[in-house]
Amino acid sequence: MNAPSYDTLARLLAGPDGDGTSLFEAAVELRDSFVRSEHLVGLLPEDAPEVLVAGLDRAGAAGVVEAWLELGRLRGYGAAPWALYPEPDLDASVEAYRNADRAGSVAGALGWVRVAYFARSEQHAAEASARLAELLAAAPEDPELLLLTGYLTQQGYGRAQDEAAAVRYHLAAAERGSDDAAFELSVLYATGTGVPADDAESQRWTVRAAEMGNARAMGNLGGMYATGRGVETDPAVALDWYTRAAEAGHARSAYTAGLMCLVGDGGLPVDRDRAQEYFARAEELGFDVDSALGQLGLSR
């Protein structure tokens, strides 16, 4: 027996009556079947990823811009960390996002520039940099555009590398609410990239980014309290920040929180049930818990 989501989308694709909205809604249901791991229990046939792509492709061609955005995301990152379906394909992701961009979607433009940049695709570098410059000229206060411009400028992706200018872009983005930019500033001050190295300033930006909700900064702040780096050691506060990072989607922090509860780190009470909850969260986010524990001579 197949999952109803698969049967519905396959039926719409096979017939002449599948309008764009119906195809998109059915494709989203099939995507969610992958997120629910129905592919692991035999409810999704082998061609389910191809059916999902075909449904989104048809919906996009019918004018549903959101379908192009979803197809770009799926081709870049998969349905979930534990369900990398359909198979990642950089060029297909870029093309789907560019279709949305052509339809007037700023999210589509940002999507393909981000995918190209993080893959360091030389093929798309010049066009991605030029497109981002156009977007920033039209919306110079947009924190996401400022952040991405900082990334490209720092790495010299499709443009001249200028680390000091990158810091200015990240600072402008952080001042306008970008937690990712605040986190980036914590790294730049720690490494002395584009600015003089300054541990106190790095820690200040780590705290600010964590308070803004940045998962990586929360994890780093947990590490600071766990080790006493720049703050007084406090295992309970460390665990709290690791827990917040885990809830925000940071896999290693979820594992570390589980480890702290498993061994009673720093005098914390051993809590195996709570440890298992954190380990399960880490696995949901794609972290190999058993391998990491095995390297420490531990098991659940």
Image (cartoon, rainbow, N blue to C red):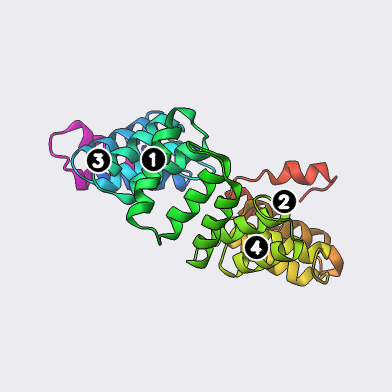
Which of marks 1 and 3 precedes in the sequence? 3
Dominant SS of magenta comes to: helix
Helix, strand or loop status at disc 1: helix
Residue 218, which numbered label?
4
Quarter-of-image position of residue 131: top left
Q: Which residue is mark 3?
A: 60
x%, y% of residue 16? Answer: 13, 34
Q: Which label belongs to residue 191?
A: 2
Secondary element under disc 4, as helix, strand or loop, is helix
Residue beneath disc 1: 130
Residue 280: x %, y % from top left: 63, 53
Asked if residue 193 lies left or right of residue 169, the reply is right
SS category of the residue bearing label 3:
helix
Tell me, yes or no, if residue 123 can be seen here. yes
Amino acid type, callout 1? Ala
Is residue 29 visible to us here? no
